[in-house]
Image: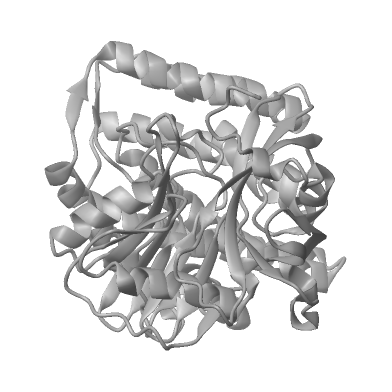
Amino acid sequence: MSENPLDRPTTDHLDPQVFVDYLEKTRWFGGKGRPFEVTAVHRIGQVPGCVDAGPAVVDHLVELTYGDAEGGTETYQVPLAFYVEAESRLDHAFVGWWEEPDRGWVHAYDALHDREAMACWLRSFVAAADDAVSGPTGLTFHRLPGHELDPDVTASLFSGEQSNSSVKFGEDSIMKLFRKVTPGANPDVTVHRALTGAGSTDVAALYGWMSWTDEQGEEYHLAMLQQFLRTATDGWDLALTSVRDLFAEGDLHAHEVGGDFAGESERLGLTLRVVHELLREHFPAERRGPEATRALAGAMRARLDAALEVVPELAQHADALRAAYDRVAALDGVDVQQVHGDLHLGQTLRTAKGWKIVDFEGEPAKPLHERVEPDSPWRDVAGMLRSFDYAPRVVEKQSVDLAEDDAEAAAQLAYRAEEWAHRNRNHFLTAYADGEPSDEAKVLLAAYVADKAVYETVYETRNRPGWVSIPLEAVARIGAA
């Protein structure tokens, strides 16, 4: 038997190709476009809240290995709901049909698509109100005090999320199940726990989380339950609406349009500043010397070198990008702390009581040990600035496609897109920095913006090739500047 502490002999009967076929058609699988094989399937436990009349829900960690030059392994969480008879309502979530050693023949479905299965998670969290609740095979549910859950509300899966899966329980709470998992504490759980304990009103309150510990004592965070913000509107959607309002008003400037977003951008900058201040109080923060800035610049160069293999069009801008990283290497130090790590408009929600920042998991493509490392808060600021640039370019691209060969219309759209982006970047940045950023901050911010744009070119090439022109044009502007 393998020495991998996750191995379970009860998965020998499972055909790995079943999971290959299913992963390739999901929204949340991060390896699209890369060759891979499933090298192990680990059964880690049954969700304890299941009832006799419902399906058994058994959690699995699926380990895969990539066969390209980049290589590496990843582990994905795939909870399965087992039914003896086929459930036609779940055909879209069908994973496979096989004989279970202790259950006989079963039809296996991705449990996140099944309301009956999702009720098992909710009942488990309800039972953990007074103490952690563990299933017979080690899945453990934890609760924070102060909020009572209703076990009888209906579960519904969110369809738009990509890197994870989220399920709403009535109008009260929402559970995020982490799809790509690694050993260690997930910052989405630890950060929300700290900010909830500090009474922050700028995040959704954490209610609980689910974990599992392997035979070597390594803990995995598998899911989290938190406040559902009923009045919330996605920040990205609000920004797109504002851009469309501007594009519809041919004779007005951005500040004259009814849907002007600048006030929201300013309030969002203030919210991020407050959250960063709280994170400095509850997590380690320090000033690191010139060796840290050289390492930071080196990491940016390495990401650029890797990106050049995937996006050859970056080559003509590589020297200008490296020059921005060189300026970081020349700094005498950098202030680091706990940050969001993957901040953009899609990670924000506008509620009746103000902006909320969500999803502190960090950049999904990075390994966990990098995501939990302290970083400069200017990384988060750069992510938002790139998002303010992205929103009008997306609407511009859609509008140009409709206008086809009208060069004059295309030029007008480009002008208005830049006007919206410039106005909202400035309002956000001025509010966050409480004025003009320092010279050191400007160097860091320019490099982080460049680094983010490079990352975007790789992401779009692999996931949405039709959009890769957006970050490539941003890289060209960065190079020209």
Q: Quadrant of residue 151?
A: bottom left
Q: Is residue 425 visible?
A: yes
| Residue 199 drawn above or below residue 402 | above
Q: Is residue 347 left or right of residue 54?
A: left
Residue 389, image x and y in percent?
A: 53, 55
Report the quarter where the N terminus lies: top right
Report x, y in % for residue 90: 74, 76
How is the rendered protein coloured? one colour
Judge by depth and name the residue closer to the eye, 19 or 130.
Answer: 130
In the displayed image of the protein, which residue is found farthest to the right?
Answer: 405
Percent position of residue 328, x then y: 38, 21
| Occupied quadrant, residue 438 | top left
Residue nearest the viewer, comparing 290 with 370: 370
Instruction: Please name the residue shown 79% across and 27% down the image.
Output: 67
Q: Is residue 402 left or right of residue 385?
A: right
Q: Nearer the viewer, residue 452 or 209?
A: 209
Question: Is any part of residue 481 visible from this angle?
Answer: no
Query: Vertical placement of 416 versus 9: above or below?
Result: below
Residue 304: % across, % down: 60, 25
Residue drawn at (37%, 75%) of the image:
350
Q: How many marks?
A: 0
Residue 183 as seen in the image, left or right of residue 302: left
**Which residue is rendered at x = 45% and y = 71% of the image?**
49
32 horizontally vs 177: left or right: right
**Residue at 86% of width from left, 68% of height from top?**
404
